[in-house]
Amino acid sequence: MAEHVSRRRLLGIGAGIGAVAAGGLALSAAWARRPASTGEQLVSEVPLPQAFWMPLPIPAVLAPVASTSEGDRYEMVQMETEAEIIPGHSTRLWTYNGVFPGPTIESRRGRHVTVAHRNELPVPTVVHLHGGRTPASSDGYPTDLVLPEGWTATAAHGHGGHAGTDDLAVVTNVQREYGFPLDQRATMLWYHDHRMDFTAPAIWRGLAGLHFVRDDIEDAIDLPRGDHELPLMIADRAFDADGQLAYPSLDPTLTGEIGVEERFTAGVLGDVILVNGAPWPVHEVDTGLYRLRILNGSNARHYELEAVTDVGRRLPLVQIGADQGLLAAPVRLQRLPIAPAERYDLLLDLNGVPVGTKVRLANRLGSGRTGDVMAFHVVREGAGMPIPETLASDLPEWDRSAAAVVRDLAFRTGRMNGRHGWLIDGLPFDPNRTDVTAELGDIEVWRLIADVHHPVHLHLVGFRVLGRGNGGPLPHDAGLKDTIALRPGESAEIITRFDGYRGRYLFHCHNAEHEDMGMMANLEII
């Protein structure tokens, strides 16, 4: 529901939203076994390695195949490969360029990047640059498929999808070029598969990678660089007795019936925590300052991260950035909640930590093995550096009194085609229906309401969190975001400006199982 409002009317908005949100509490209790999780955990059948034994891999940076005054061109092949994730076992993965996570792209603000993707997998694919300020033609709309050799568009859209065909879909054979102007703030983005109905199992099988945007504003700030800047993609998985990825798809070929076994419809959780594709890794560090670029690449698992030494000393996590780039000033946290698809930019100061210490990155929402993420082993002295007290000055300032529209959007469970689904305002996703129409350049306030955990992601734009429930934003809500983690029964208000490009975009829950089972909607920018 949307309403056009005057300045006076807008100032009074918010009354009654808490009562509406409270209606979701009873349902959230039924779906979430405890407040820390929404979903059901798979149990691995293969012996698992001990924690903090395998070294942390750092994803390789992809070199462009061509660079001109007009920009950089990259090429990737989507392919199946084998990799040793669990020691002694070879695991089949779907990958970008044969590696998991996919290769990292390093780019500059405003410098155009073209990525040519070739699909050599057995199913259609779609690539979305999550957090990218991208023209609609390259945003990775879920029906804009790249078909494998031998597939037809009719066959591709005839699979078990919940919405039938899409007359506006742009389908290509084998290869597609995605163009990214990257006219946006410096930040860490990520790219992943976004095919309608099958995003969750495709990401689970390995189709995800990182993409950095750099700019002069970031360069001018004295921050850790080189081997003191660590990209960390955290993702849970589970493994069967043969060391293969376990996932409860109704159709393991990912070409027919959509969805997962009934008990996993709230989300699929794994019992193995991977960081950059390695289970519970360890990384050797010095006593200096480290910049941690963290992505929660899990399908449904939420984390609450804490850095603690092996003698129980808790180290502060200093937040310097969010999904869409640097904050104006650091925020010092003891623990950091992070939902699927969220990214946080943190500083970890190891000055004063004795050589020989292990600093554990723990997950306070986990239990047993899922309570550990990775460790940093301090093996040498290093040169310290101060934490900057001021950061970026280019954050947008939007005044809620200037909003043209206020929208109420409910994210709740419901029925879809006679079975369980996840709905936005009572409706499952349909590519042929426009759910929200926004005018280019307009500022809008969105009021979001959840029944259980829903990390809500907007394509194209970043937003600011105005408040949660009847209060203000939480400390980690600072800065510009593109994904907000709604907790069970919670409401939140966000503000954004729809600028950049016209066209068809999306907003959806980034619990990937919820997304596949209907919790996605169309956003038309006109």
Image (cartoon, rainbow, N blue to C red):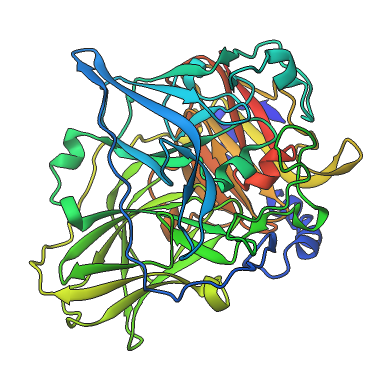
Residue 220, quarter of picture: top left
* Residue at 69%, 45% in the rendered image: 514
* Residue at 72%, 49% in the rendered image: 16
Task: Judge left or right: residue 54 versus residue 201.
Answer: left
* Residue at 48%, 17% in the rendered image: 176
- Which of the pair 266/356 is nearer the observer? 356
- Which of the pair 485/152 is nearer the observer? 152
Question: x%, y% of residue 265?
Answer: 76, 52
Please indicate, yes or no, whether residue 173 appears anywhere in the rendered image.
yes
Question: x%, y% of residue 269?
Answer: 63, 60
Task: Judge left or right: residue 180 versus residue 174.
Answer: left
User: Residue most toward the bottom?
Assistant: 311
Question: x%, y% of residue 197?
Answer: 70, 34
- Which of the pair 134/320 is nearer the observer? 134
Please indicate, yes or no, whether residue 509 appears anywhere in the rendered image.
no
Q: Is residue 190 above or below residue 137?
A: below
Question: x%, y% of residue 335?
Answer: 42, 69
Point out the image quarter for the C terminus: top right
Point out the image quarter for the N terminus: top right
- Which of the pair 394/253 is nearer the observer? 253
* Residue at 75%, 50% in the rendered image: 20
Residue 7, quarter of picture: top right
Q: Is residue 501 above or below residue 506?
A: above
